[in-house]
Amino acid sequence: MNGKVLLALFAVLGCGNTQVLHSNLEPEVGMLGGKCYGNGTCSKGLVCDGSVCVTQEVAEPEVLIGSRDDTVAVVADVAHGDTVDVLAADVRDVSGDMGDGTESAEEVASDVVVDVISLCGCAGKECGPDGCGVVCGACGNGFACVLGQCLSLSACGDGICSVGEDYSGCPADCTCVPACLGKECGDDGCGGSCGGCGASEVCNQNLGLCEADSCWPDCGDEVLIPAGNFWMGCNVAVDPYCYTNGFPYHEVYLDGYYIDHTEVTVDAYSACVAAGGCTAPPFISPYCNWGVAGRGLHPVNCVTWQQVYEYCAWAGKRLPTEAEWEKAARGTDGRKYPWGNETATCEYAVTYENGCGCGIDSMMPVCSKSPAGDSPYGLCDMAGNVLEWTADWYLSNYYSTSPASNPTGPISGSTRVYRGGWFCGGPLQVTYRFDTNPLYGGFGFGGRCARTQ
């Protein structure tokens, strides 16, 4: 057997579990019989059992080398970290067209396996295989072996994006990568936007593409609410008496959108009825404004959720989501009312004071309390006059599970959310959430429309 063959076989057979014992001395840390390293590992070929380094027996499958192709497969297996054991008993003559007619398995192996020498060894490794069937070490509890190194499996919230963590599971530690490939607009998945659309376009949120706006250029009296974050829910710093469905106080990102400056008026709704896009509200109470002379600029009321929904669709718009309504009403500073934190009175809202409607026993024309009662974006009557339907189904604990970006409410339900207080009183705080059957159209109900930017 020539020297090249000996070198090749040594490369394969020399990867055993060999330890050197230091006689008459206490075993060194990390060595056989010694204490484990602080991270729960030992030197190559050893594992930490309790606190002592012991030999780990590795079951190694026998591989019969029967041809040059088999030998190449062995080398490939070793290169991928698999365990290989080549025994002298497995070596036999192999016939084939190798150029000289016949070669032994030793000769075949000597041509290929010599390259395995560089793949074996635990130099620079704390754990994992050495490439020749030897385990370089094992990691202790709380650590994971990654590319031969023991890395800590830290808890979410420690400021380190550790093995097994990502932004979706631990946003406090890991960086979010925006998902805007192929998108012109819409949510980027990281609390930001992939871009905005032109004045005559709206963003198709499902596709992330800008499309022609159905109501352009006559979209009515609208206000743009810019994209960005705001605080949603009960802020106990300014309102210690919230309902439980207003918790937790949480930050929400919304894409930009438009919302009507005023509640839908009787005159605006009349145009929809005349065009066949809406049904006339029933006259169920003397407080209903529909069909009453001189009430054209009053908010339309006595309407169901479906009637307001159909009006907004006819106008090329939609109902605002609950989150969109609240941001438009309070802005980004966590205030209690649209105008700020000052006590709700008839200076700011059409509400109950000396009787319904500030003592006149009816609603008032839209924006009668403007600008004193306006929201930070200049919207009027976000508190008082009529209650306003929103697009969302109602779930009392929705805030506990709602997404942090563009929430649209539960996918189903039995009641719809309405907001805003009314002319006969009721809480006027912008965070207060109410719900009722969407088929109900009491004299306190109206609405306003929104549309995507």
Image (cartoon, helix red, strand yellow):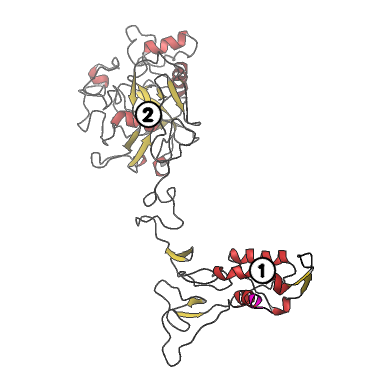
Residue 120 circle label: none
Q: Residue at x 51, y 83 (%)?
A: 19
User: Which is closer to the viewer, label 2 or label 1?
Assistant: 1
Q: Residue at x 73, y 76 (%)?
A: 91
Residue 411 on the magenta span = no
Distance from disc 2 to disc 1, alpha carbons, whole Å, reads 68 Å
- Main SS of the magenta part reads helix
Residue position marked by numbered label 1 in the rendering: 111
Q: Count residues near mark 1 (Cα–Cα under 10 Å), then give few for <14, some for 14-19, many for 20+.
A: some
**Residue 153: image location, x then y, percent:** 43, 61
**Residue 246 appears in which quarter of the rendering?**
top left
Q: Residue at x 70, y 74 (%)?
A: 106
Three-letter residue code for mark 2: Gly
Helix, strand or loop at mark 2: loop
Nearest the viewer among 125 and 391 is: 125
**Residue 428 appears in which quarter of the rendering?**
top left
| 8 lies left or right of 433 | right
Residue 256 circle label: 2
Kindly tell me whether residue 292 is visible in this rendering: yes
| 53 lies left or right of 430 | right
Q: Count residues near mark 2 (Cα–Cα under 10 Å), then give few for <14, some for 14-19, many for 20+.
A: many
Segment colored magenta? 1-5
Locate the N terminus by quadrant. bottom right
Nearest the viewer among 3 and 261 is: 3
